[in-house]
Image: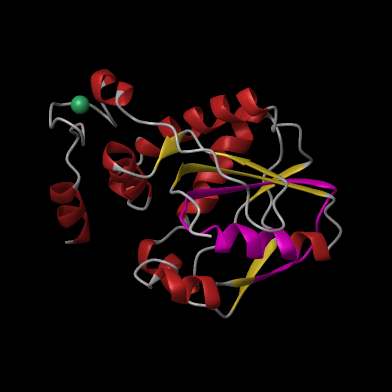
Amino acid sequence: MLDVVAAALFPLRCPGCGRPAEPVCADCAQTMARPAAAAPPRGVDAWCAPFSYEGVARELVARVKYRHARAATPWLAAAMVTTLEEHGLGDVDVVTWPPTTPARRRRRGFDHSEVLAGEVARRIHRPAAAVLVRRGGDAQTGRPAALRRRGGPQFVATASPARVLLVDDVTTTGATLSAAAVALRLRGARWVGAVTAARTPSLR
Ligand SMILES: [Zn+2]
């Protein structure tokens, strides 16, 4: 039943123009804007993202969360790696991700951030490792920005090498990346970079 619903929600069509294409047609890919420059959130040394979180990019990021439209994941990962290389941020010891909530992982059957991190790690020839554990905090989506800033998720790092790259699908307030970076630093990380598929302007 869920398979049928997912297939109906996300047929193999370009989210920009509706023509058959997976995950996005070349014309609409050209329209995807870069995010505005912004200082990284607290605890993060440098960050980058290939796309502004709007329009087609927003649709593609949504697809990463659903099994049946997974072509978006390698496509976005490839764009993330290109941006990483442009910014010179790929020289890291390990790639990791802020884990989603256990409830969401159970519901979807996988952690979309973990899958995205694995795709990025493979492309930059670095290991991906689960070193962050979520402690309390609610899922970010659907909560007002003010609430997100006050009571974002908290993480504990079980280990951390010196240079870590955080991977996530999207960042809005930067609160999740910041919380993850702080946890990694408490475990000994000396440099924390972050790459997301999309980014909205900082709300500070
Ligand atoms: Zn299109």
Along the line of sight, which residue is nearer the eye, 70 or 169?
169
User: Please, which residue is most extreme toward the front here?
Assistant: 204
Q: Position of residue 63 (x, y in %)?
A: 31, 46
Residue drawn where x is 42% and y is 68% of the image: 145
Q: Image quarter for residue 127?
A: top right
Residue drawn where x is 34% and y is 30% of the image: 32
Along the line of sight, which residue is nearer the eye, 99 or 29?
29
Q: Quadrant of the N terminus?
A: bottom left
| Residue 161 falls within the magenta-colored stretch | yes
100 up-or-down from 17: above or below = below
Q: Quadrant of ligand 1?
A: top left
Which contiguous range is marked in magenta?
155-183
Q: Position of residue 129 (x, y in %)?
A: 69, 51
Q: Image quarter for residue 150?
A: bottom right
Q: Position of residue 182 (x, y in %)?
A: 73, 63
Residue drawn where x is 55% and y is 24% of the image: 82
141 up-or-down from 58: above or below = below
63 up-or-down from 35: above or below = below
